[in-house]
Image (tube, grey):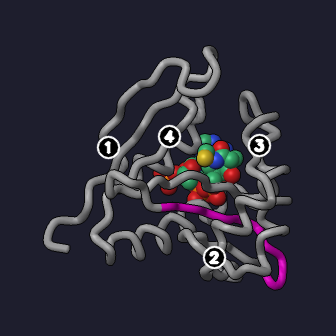
Amino acid sequence: MSDVTYRRARPGDFLEIAALDRGAWRQNADATFVPDGEHVWRLWVEHALTFVACQGSELVGAVLAFPCLAGSWCLHKVMVQEVFRGRGIGSGLFRVLLAELDDRGAEVFLTVDPANQRARRLYEGFGFAESVFVSGFYRPEEDRLVLSRRALSGT
Ligand SMILES: CC(C)(COP(=O)(O)OP(=O)(O)OC[C@H]1O[C@@H](n2cnc3c(N)ncnc32)[C@H](O)[C@@H]1OP(=O)(O)O)[C@@H](O)C(=O)NCCC(=O)NCCS
């Protein structure tokens, strides 16, 4: 979408991102426990890598990655408001986040519900190729695929 802009999140964005998070999972399995809370979003917008997609003054999508002790980065969450999906915004968020992570030479992993075809297609398109199935990653019935994307060589 040509009128959507992307930028690093600012501390003042955290309440709006948390509200987006509370609404983004309605169509997903086990949606009740997925949204993260306002306090951790307040920390992530300042101390992790969070990008937002905006149409005018409205925040319509967000993506987040944070560094891990082992040296790789966890791409913890990507979400787009329901009415804005399928228009390239999730891909736009991935582009800006991964450009930044590639500049840092970062290896990145994420987890996804194996049944979330739309998200898997997005991730595979951005080079998340290595996949490990973890049974009961959250609750016994909540499995996850852990997908990894290698650091760009030469960085
Ligand atoms: C996953 C999500 C972020 C994708 O955002 P989006 O803005 O719709 O993504 P895009 O429009 O950039 O499309 C990304 C890919 O999904 C595919 N896609 C779009 N709409 C689709 C649909 N209705 N059904 C299946 N695939 C679809 C696109 O084809 C695209 O793949 P392609 O580039 O190979 O064609 C969004 O659907 C979302 O917020 N879902 C709820 C939260 C979630 O599940 N997050 C992921 C887990 S953390």
Q: How many marks?
A: 4
Q: Amino acid at mark 3?
A: Trp
- Residue corresponding to mark 1: 129
Disc 4 C-beta below 8 A from ligand 1:
yes
- Residue corresponding to mark 3: 25
- Residue farthest to the top, as pictured: 140
N-terminal of the pair, mark 3 or mark 2, is 3
Quarter of the rendering containing residue 48: bottom right
Residue at 78% from the left image edge and 53% from the top image edge: 37
- Residue corresponding to mark 2: 46
From the top left corner, tell me how far across and down residue 51 is, in percent: 60, 72
Instruction: Report the Cα–Cα distance between label 2 and label 4.
Output: 23 Å
Label 3 crowd (10 A; few <14 / some 14-19 / many >=20): some
Q: Which residues are magenta?
A: 56-66
Q: Secondary structure at mark 3?
A: loop
Q: Amino acid at mark 1?
A: Ala
Instruction: Report the Cα–Cα distance between label 3 and label 2.
Output: 24 Å
Q: Amino acid at mark 2?
A: Glu
Q: Secondary structure at mark 1?
A: loop
- Residue corresponding to mark 4: 111
